[in-house]
Amino acid sequence: MPVLWIILIVIAIGAVGYVATRARAMASAGNDARHLHSLPSYYGYMAFLFAAAPAFLLLIVWLIAAPLVIEKRVAATLPADVVEQAASQNLLMAEVRRVAVGLDNAVAAGVMDEDLASNARADFTDMTARLKEAGQVITQNVTTPVLRAAQMMREANASSRLWMTIAVIAVAIAGAALAMMRAQRDYRARNVVERGVRWMLVGAASIAILTTVGIVLSLLFNTIEFFRIYPASEFFGSLTWSPSFGGGSELGIWPLLWGTLYISVIALAVAVPIGLFAAIYLSEYASNRVRSVAKPLLEILAGIPTIVYGLFALLTVGPLLLAAFGDGGLGWMQSGTAVMTAGLVMGIMLIPFVSSLSDDIINAVPQAMRDGSYGLGATQSETIRQVVLPAALPGIVGAVLLAASRAIGETMIVVLGAGAAARLSLNPFEAMTTVTAKIVSQLTGDADFASPEALVAFALGMTLFVITLGLNVFALYIVRKYREQYD
Amino acid sequence: MNDMRPLERIVDTDNIKISAKGCQVYYGDTHAIKDVDVQIEDKTVTAFIGPSGCGKSTFLRCLNRMNDTIDICRIEGEILLDGENIYDKKVDPVQLRAKVGMVFQKPNPFPKSIYDNVAYGPRIHGLAKNKADLDVIVEKSLRRGAIWDEVKDRLDAPGTGLSGGQQQRLCIARAVATEPEVLLMDEPCSALDPIATGQVEELIDELRSQYSVVIVTHSMQQAARVSQKTAFFHLGNLVEFGETGQIFTKPEDPRTESYISGKIG
């Protein structure tokens, strides 16, 4: 039975449980809700919770665990010589899975009937012919043992699915029945629902955290794999980045890190003053009418996809800069793609981040601070410079560091605006590239996934992750340390 | 009401420092202050009393044009400081506020050191020629704020770390440091405990020797204790203005009498 159907059935059981339990609770209180411990609907919610929560939990665990168990059992049946021949058990199992899916599809398409698909003595050539006829991909690797393994896998899958359906529905019914039995007038259903809600929220929070952990782990394992085949001293020590997929590449991170930092610094040099001044204008000087128009307009900038900024860099800012600093002008610039181009455009992208956050923070400075300063005969700009900004400083630093993490992680603007050459240079009018842009180019090539040239992407990603994580932690620290100073 | 000590106080001088004539204040469509005439004397503590929302704080904020920061606020009539209309176009409100200092209801020290809090005004107005000069001003102001002994060893500590009463005295020292001629106090003791209130009241009495002090208060006992002149506001009107002793013993207006005897407000 498809999973969707199972889910719908469980929900239906929960709904029936809701109605039945609510009615039973009401009956136990002589149909007067005032005699119940909780509102009648709480008994119903409890029934739904009892039916759905364990059932869905079981469903999820089964869906994750069953393929692993089945695959292990099937893999054990493959003869050792076949495995050796295929060089890798993983590759062979991938083949088995593909054939199993192919058989399923063939049955679904009507080319094969169920008996033939699961017939353990079916003729091998006939099967492959039929599979091909059904439009399923069959490679040379499909041999009799693989076919038999695939058949076994299908069988195991089918029975697993059947048992899963039975188990999940049984659990749901049992849960609903349990709730119904407990639905007496003194039973504290409200507290049970409260606990249920709490665990639901805990679950949501842990999914977010576990995903982060998963991302870090996947990065970490690949990074370790990379450092096993490429020396870490080279990666962190070499000043050259020249990957060549034929082998013998030099993969030093410094040119990329330099490009990242250079572009980020230029971007921040653009974004921080403009964003901060805009925030000061909006929060301190602008009238309500101006603010209600200008603030959303400024925030539109944050909604523009970065690829559009990239096009802006490539088509507008690059040529403009080239006209001024290129051969026709000062002669410092060779082409439109340069650190300066990407940095300027990225700075524009970051303005709303800085201004919007700073604006909120400046608004949060108590009016009493401003009154105190005005009461001493300070002007508006003196008040802002000497009282409001120092009070808002921790928050502003937080905003700037957040913008910095955005700048460091930015990719599209760099790809289109800064070029692809990894070089260590001080001239901001030269093309450079960043860590993120190189991660893309290393992983989108035709390289073997096990080669250092591809795996280096994970090491780069990990380095970047550590840097931005450090920045975020630092930002949090700054904000916490100075937050409550004006209270 | 046992605590009230309506004394016959002799006012040192009858120099008029601030004089309001036909003052009207509107918040949007609300008529907050109705035709107030009042004369505030130099070197005198004048108390504004009245029930909440009667306009006493609003009127106080008119005296140093703090209401200018509120967009919808509109003022008519004239308020003269030393004979000069402070709402005249020639008058710079920033300069005015240096002359008419203000202390607020809630202590609001800046998130800076105690020293920098007091040095803030003198620095903006360039009152000190050098660092030594500034040190002298800071010390003098803190002494006048009756807080010097408590903070002289920790001038670098943040002003926000002081207790509520200390913070309020720091704010008074901060206001005094700019050498104002008039000191406006908007319920300066409402956030303080009785001991801190006592200290601030003592301080207000000392300040009288040099400044004209105007204090808004909810506590009639406080008005009786610290002021020489009292103005009673009700619903935006100035009901009665006179010697404190007279207001509290022989009020002329029945509304004043009802208020001070606790029947209204």
Image: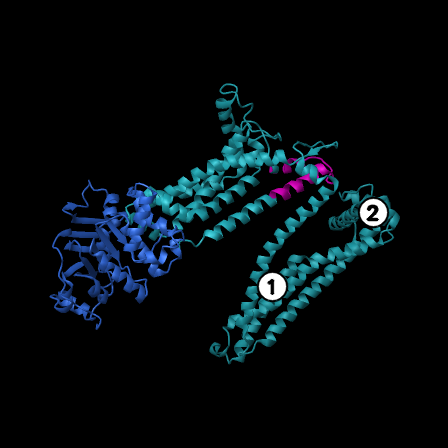
Chain colours: A cyan, B blue
The percent position of residue B181, horizontal first and vertical second, equals: 21, 50
The percent position of residue B22, horizontal first and vertical second, equals: 14, 52
Instruction: Identify the chain of the residue marked 1, using the numbered disc in the image.
Output: A
At a point 50% along the width and 23% down the height, the residue shown is A325
**Is residue A130 visible to us here?**
yes
The percent position of residue B40, horizontal first and vertical second, equals: 16, 54
What residue is disc 2 on?
A127
| Depth order, front residue of A284/A153 | A284
| Depth order, front residue of B50/B116 | B116
Predominant secondary structure, magenta span = helix
B53 relative position to A167: left or right: left
At a point 28% along the width and 59% down the height, the residue shown is B188
At a point 71% along the width and 31% down the height, the residue shown is A244
Instruction: Identify the chain of the residue marked 2, using the numbered disc in the image.
Output: A
**From which residue to which does the magenta span run?**
A436-464
What amino acid is at disc 1?
Answer: Ile
Q: Which quadrant would the N terminus of chain B be assigned to in this image?
A: bottom left
Q: Residues within 10 Å of mark 2 (few under 14, many from 20)?
A: some
Position of residue A40 relative to residue A276, above or below, is below
Secondary structure beneath dot 1 equals helix
What amino acid is at disc 2?
Answer: Met
The percent position of residue A241, horizontal first and vertical second, equals: 66, 32
Give the mark nearest the N terminus, 2 or 1.
Answer: 1
A76 relative position to B125: left or right: right
Position of residue A82 relative to residue A240, above or below, is below
**Mark carried by residue B185:** none
What residue is disc 1 on?
A11
